[in-house]
Amino acid sequence: MSIEFKVEGMSCQHCVAAVTRAIQEQDAGAQVQVDLSAGKVAVQSGASVDSLQAAIDEAGYTVVGVGVGSN
């Protein structure tokens, strides 16, 4: 499933690594692409949207929007 999260609080490569790690702890095979300038995190994963959003929140970032695709 393709999921796009709008995330606040990301500003550097450390943030990218922290968000990527948090998502991959939920789904080790997840593909994660972070766009810092747009504040977006695109994820290809079989994990639930809720679990991925919770992982991002627990990493210290705020999810302010979620879009789900069928890919």
Image (cartoon, rainbow, N blue to C red):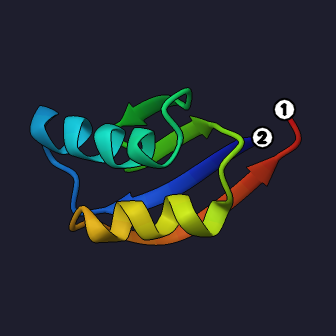
At x 58%, y 38%, the residue is 43
Disc 1 marks a residue whose amino acid type is Asn
Image quadrant of residue 25?
top left
Disc 2 marks a residue whose amino acid type is Met
Instruction: Please state the horizontal and vertical placement of residue 29, each as a whole percent of the image.
Output: 55, 26
In the image, residue 34 sits, relative to residue 66, either above or below, namely above
At x 15%, y 47%, the residue is 11
In the image, residue 69 sits, relative to residue 48, either above or below, namely above
Image quadrant of residue 49?
bottom right
Instruction: Please state the horizontal and vertical placement of residue 58, each as a whole percent of the image.
Output: 29, 69
In the image, residue 59 sits, relative to residue 18, either above or below, namely below
Q: Are marks 1 and 2 in contact (CB under 8 Å)?
A: yes
Q: Which mark is residue 71?
A: 1
At x 53%, y 55%, the residue is 5
Q: Few, some or many C-alpha atoms within 10 Å of disc 1 (few <14, some 14-19, many ≥20)?
A: few
Label 2 sits on residue = 1
Relative horizontal placement of residue 54, taking residue 10 as reference (left or right): right
Q: Few, some or many C-alpha atoms within 10 Å of disc 2 (few <14, some 14-19, many ≥20)?
A: some
Instruction: Please state the horizontal and vertical placement of residue 2, each as a whole percent of the image.
Output: 73, 39
Q: Secondary structure at mark 1?
A: loop
Lower sequence index among marks 1 and 2: 2
Whether residue 37 is visible here, answered yes or no, is no
Whether residue 30 is visible here, answered yes or no, is yes
Instruction: Please state the horizontal and vertical placement of residue 63, each as a whole percent of the image.
Output: 43, 69
